[in-house]
Amino acid sequence: MQQHTANNEAVIKSAGHKQLTGADMRALLQGKTLSGLYRGGFHFITTMDDDLRMEGRNHVGSHNFGVCEFDDEAHTMTVTWENGWDHTTTRAYHVGDEVRFFDVHDGSWRQTLTSFQDGRQSLKVFR
């Protein structure tokens, strides 16, 4: 996996990477088990059910539940967690085989998804 934290949204856009629409994000993420990396070097795995309810776990053992909303006009995804994880609204871009998410307020990198599996899979996280 490449280093992500040095990139911001302006760098990704200037490199010509495709921004995903709200519909693109929904099609890619809904009903899947997703894994990747988020700020602070945390590795995570999250399930997103068809009703957009989420369950996530990171490599240090933190576990949480949340809900996702897609905005088809703004082309954003908002995730709200129940127990203290960061609530985020992001835009997403295809970068190679990954999807990178950037904060809508300051363009900073939030997370990168590197694996997309159909359905609900085990929430075991390996570094």
Image (tube, rainbow, N blue to C red):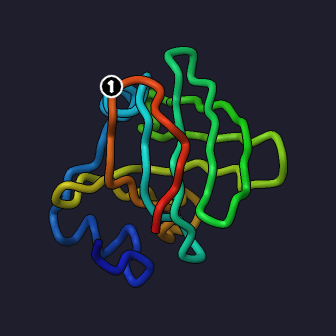
Type of the residue with mark 1:
Ala
Tag 1, which secondary structure?
A: helix
Residue most extreme to the right: 83
**Does 119 sit above or below residue 20?**
above
Residue most extreme to the bottom: 6
**Residue depicted at 72% across the width and 48% down the height:** 63
Q: As rendered, which of 79 and 125 lies closer to the eye?
A: 125
Mark 1 closeness class: few <14, some 14–19, many ≥20 residues within 10 Å: few
Q: How many marks?
A: 1
**Residue depicted at 59% across the width and 48% down the height:** 89
Q: Is residue 7 left or right of residue 46?
A: left
Q: Which residue is mark 1?
A: 27
Q: Position of residue 110 (x, y in %)?
A: 52, 63
**Does 3 sit above or below residue 44?**
below
Q: Is residue 87 left or right of residue 34?
A: right
Q: Could you say which quadrant of the image residue 1 lies in?
A: bottom left
Q: Position of residue 15 (x, y in %)?
A: 17, 70
**Does 125 sit above or below residue 30?**
below
Q: Position of residue 104 (x, y in %)?
A: 53, 56
**Residue depicted at 54% across the width and 60% down the height:** 103
Q: Position of residue 57 (x, y in %)?
A: 63, 50
**Residue depicted at 33% across the width and 25% down the height:** 27
